Image: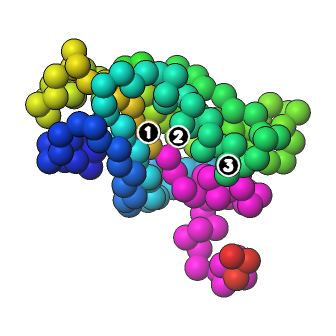
Amino acid sequence: MQARVMEAQEPPVRVVVPGKCYRYEATDATHEWHFYQVEGLAVAEGITFADLKGTLYEFARRVFGEDRQIRFRCDYFPFVEPGVDMSISNFRDPATEDWIEIMGAGMVHPKVLAGVGYDPDRYTGFAFGMGPERIGMLKYGIDDIRHFYSNDVRFLRQF
């Protein structure tokens, strides 16, 4: 979706787009074969990795509060370089160093910028993709992502 936005619009670009995703994956408490993802993109002159981290930190602080620990780790995603994943300390016991990854992010790769007609020497940008189910799990203490799709009215009535 992000590439389509860039193809249709000249910089600066700032967009957040939700969508449903499907992938071949075994399901467990934190993984599901279908899920929602919210993607974000910012492209303009002078955007840095510090802008990415600042945006994601502010998001996490507003959603989860000041008491949660936030961690970035290097990760590979094909359309960004460098790439990172962002994890939040688990809702049960932050002292156990239990983390849940909530999103992948990074600086938009110069070849992606060039591929949509942007000058990568002039423009930079960042992108992220997050799973709202995992955010809900952490925010509301839900221990299994499959509850969101179980159609159990007792679970759904809590919200």
Q: Which residues are magenta?
A: 130-156
Q: Quadrant of residue 119?
A: top left
Q: Badge 2 is on which residue?
A: 103
**Residue type for callout 3:** Arg
Disc 1 + disc 2, Cβ < 8 Å: yes
Give residue 56's position: percent from left, percent from top.
56, 37
Q: Quadrant of residue 18?
A: bottom left
- Helix, strand or loop for disc 1: strand
Question: Tag 1: Cα neighbours inside 10 Å, few (<14), some, or many (≥20)?
Answer: many
**Residue type for callout 1:** Phe
The image's mark for residue 128 is: 1
Cα–Cα span, label 3 and label 1: 17 Å
- Residue pictured at 75% horizontal, 34% vertical: 69
Give residue 61's position: percent from left, percent from top.
69, 43
N-terminal label among 2 and 3: 3
> Which is in the foreground here, disc 1 or disc 2?
1
**Residue type for callout 2:** Met
Q: Nearer the viewer, residue 146 or 83?
A: 83
